[in-house]
Image: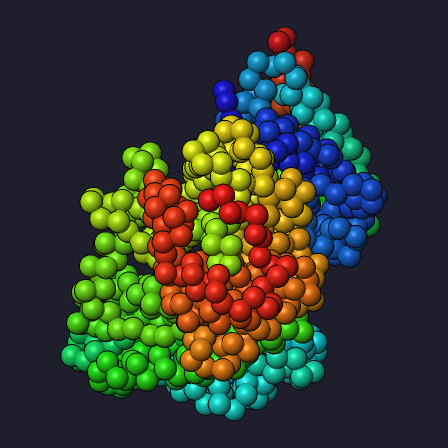
Amino acid sequence: MSLPTAFEDASFATAPEVLLVDDDEVNLMLTAFALRERGFRIVEASSGEAALELLRDHVPDIVVLDALMPGLDGFDTCRALRVMPGLDTVPVLMLTGLDDDASITRAYRAGATDFFVKAAQWSLLAGRLQYLLRASRTRIELERSKSKLARAQDLARMGSFDWRRNERGVVGGLVLSPEALRVLNLGPQDRADLRTVLRMVPPDDRRSLMRQLQAVGQQSSVLTADVPMVLLDGRKRMLHIEAEPEFNEQGQGAGYTGILQDVTDRRAAEDKILELANFDALTGLPNRRQLIWRAERALEQARRLSHQFAVLLIDLDRFKVINDTLGHGAGDEVLVEVGRRLRGCVRHSDQVMEGALEVTGARSHRALEAIGRLGGDEFLALLPEVADDEDAERVAFRVLEALRQPICVSGQECFVTASVGVALYPRDGHSVVDLLRNSDVAMYSVKAQGKNASAIYSPQLAGQGREKLEMETDLHKAIERNELVLHYQPKVDVRAAAMVGAEALMRWQRGGRLVPPGEFIPLAEDTGLIVPLSEWALREAAKQARVWQQAFGFDDAIAVNLPSRLFERSDLVEHIHQCVTAVSVPHRMIQLEITEDNLMQELQNVIPSLHRLNEIGVEISIDDFGTGYSSLAYLTTLPISELKIDRSFVRDLGITPQSSAVVTAIIALARSLGLRVIAEGVETLRQMDVLHRLGCGVMQGFLFSRAVPSEDLQRWLEQTVLPRKAPWIGVALDGPQGSGGPLVMGRKLRY
Amino acid sequence: MNAEPDNPQLDTAAVARLHDLDPDGRHGVVRRVLTAFEASLERMLVQFTAEQSNGRADVVSGLAHTLKSSSASVGALALAKACAEAEQRLRNAASDDLGAEVLLLTRECKLALAAVRAILQAPL
């Protein structure tokens, strides 16, 4: 026969232990047998005294006590064990006689958990024991769970509360758990009624909380609220409150039960996350994500309310120069300051927007207005409602004006300008993507036309953009297709009537048209193609030097224009070396020209190359001299050989006294530094005459020859210079000699 | 007062329940219980004799209480019934003749003892 065991409900890991106390040997023996058969472990005691003795060092899972025993009876034993350590919650089953009502009452009073009528029905007894053990286990688990909850609540800075309405004469009110009191920085003894708690809420928030409580209370609905509180010690905390209604038997709301939790840190973290997700960490302005979100909302509103809105793409001009010369830290400072100034150009709203736009009126989209940072040196102004182009242009003008004042970084004044492209909904695009792209097109058109201005998008600009893209594609292939050529313009010593060198100028034969450098060099610089282009030019120039050397004994230098980024390359010297040795001409037959502007911007990065080039015999000429802002102190230390007076001064020679003053100064400077000087853009005999008089004898310009293909240059030499047929030859020779002396190299007569 | 049976016996159902506690007799439960009961009855008889004259009602009532449940358990139903009734009477002070109660209980004890011994002496 198999009997159900006491631990069929797997909640007992081992057989539960029963302390069985009965003075009657027979009963004790029988009950013990019966219970052992049913899976209990039995410890027997034949008297109350013996039982208490056993309990002193051992706690069973349950105690079964015969009520009536000689000596210490079951009631006294029960009372005694209840005060022993660890035994206050052990279940005690009292065995009584069938009609013994008095014993039952006495048993409960003595602290027994339950009673059982003594009988030989062992299964019933075992069942009762199982029930009591399970109840006890459940109680223990509840206790544990309660203390775990309290601990968890403490850790989570959370506590429970109950609130009861006054009902049928019973006074209700708020009861906070000890954990909840701790959340409010109150001790377990502190009184905290609803009024006390509400007083911790700042007045404005209290009013709206009261309204919410009233509304929720009237409908007996769930309460969820984040409530700011100022605790009694002055600390500001954010509490999250969640409560569910409870109902009485009549189904009426009787009160609320819920939790409150200190979510200050979580809210701060959430706010931070929201900020990081929506704002640029450097400038604090809305970031691309937030801007696009706002633009989408502005577009919806504009569509709904049939008005126009504008995006202004603001790109800083030459920001890379600041970053490269002053460092990224300074670049960041500039961006922060630019952000600050731009913010003042619109009715900027910093409100974090996520989810739905709260419509608080027909003009709610005004709150979308903002300046944001799209990334890098690109900013965007979002104008959610504009009447026309002029509205947007006014803001663009404010932007340009705001940047006019220099920005002081790293103790240095920086002039920052911007190019602004404007696109209007719906005219310039029906989606945010289109509007952004078209503002970009407009912005690029400003860049192309010299920067520091604004432009409104037009479809023609987009056409230009396409053209530019095609040109870029073609330029990539120009070298391999042999579409690039070098034209040469002679440098002439007018007194000697001799060519003393040539400047190589790049031309692009594109589809039967000769593209002037002004059209494709900036593009090459933007795209980085300038590097392979320049390298090609150096190779070509070296080859040409060799050809002329063999053809007519050319022994001077061909000057190649290089952008500063070439000088920054560590392999420039090696490359030039390869170019000249490949054709067996000396290094000095290649000269490099760098514009003054370019040189000064990248000065620190370029100087090492200049020195190394100088060492191998490659001379450096400063192009467009006088237009940049050269520090004279630098000039004295730079390894340069030649200054080229900018054509703008030459053009005005003999017209404005200032220009001859500048030219005189440059010549004097060159002379004192031991540099050669050459004037470019000489077109008239009068200019030549003045220059010569002022002491500059080497010139370049249409007066002598345009930049021409190499074979034309040779023909010009043979047919014009050598026969001395050109109009300028006589003039120069006849003109005053005075100051030309040391700057003119008269040894080139054989050309 | 019940008629005395000629051949006193234990209630078969109760004895069967004892057997059920130890179906294959491995633990010798029936014999051990009955032996314990026998010893208990012998002790009781001595105590009843002591209480026969000048005894105390609460002592006799306590003895009856103890004997009541063990005799019921082993199937000495007549003794159990006698104990219950005596206990009841003594506790309610419904009997003023303690000697008669003791006599009655003594007689039932002896009968139960005979029945137990009969079983214990029977071959297994």
In the rendered image, the residue lying farthest to the top is B123
Q: Residue at x 63, y 21 (%)?
A: B30
Give how far across and how far down residue A560 sits, in percent.
Answer: 48, 47
Question: How many numbered callouts?
Answer: 0
Position in image of residue A288 (x %, y %): 40, 63
- Reply above or below: A77 against A46: below
Residue ID at (69%, 33%): A42
Where on the picture, by quarter, is residue A510? top left
Instruction: Pick whichever, A258 or A462, lies toward us.
Output: A462
Does A317 sit left or right of A676 as displayed? left
Against A365, is A725 above or below? above
In front of the other: A302 or A185: A302
Q: Position of residue B32 (x, y in %)?
A: 69, 21
Residue A735 visible in the current orientation: yes
Q: How is the image coloured?
A: rainbow
Question: In which image quadrant can residue B37 be found?
Answer: top right
Give the image location of residue A286, x and y in percent: 43, 70
Looking at this view, is A365 or B9 the one in front? A365
Query: On the picture, is A494 further left or further right than A421?
Result: right
Q: Residue at x 63, y 8 (%)?
A: B123
Q: Residue at x 57, y 48 (%)?
A: A747
Decide if residue A317 is on the left or right side of residue A641: left
Q: Is residue A239 visible?
A: no
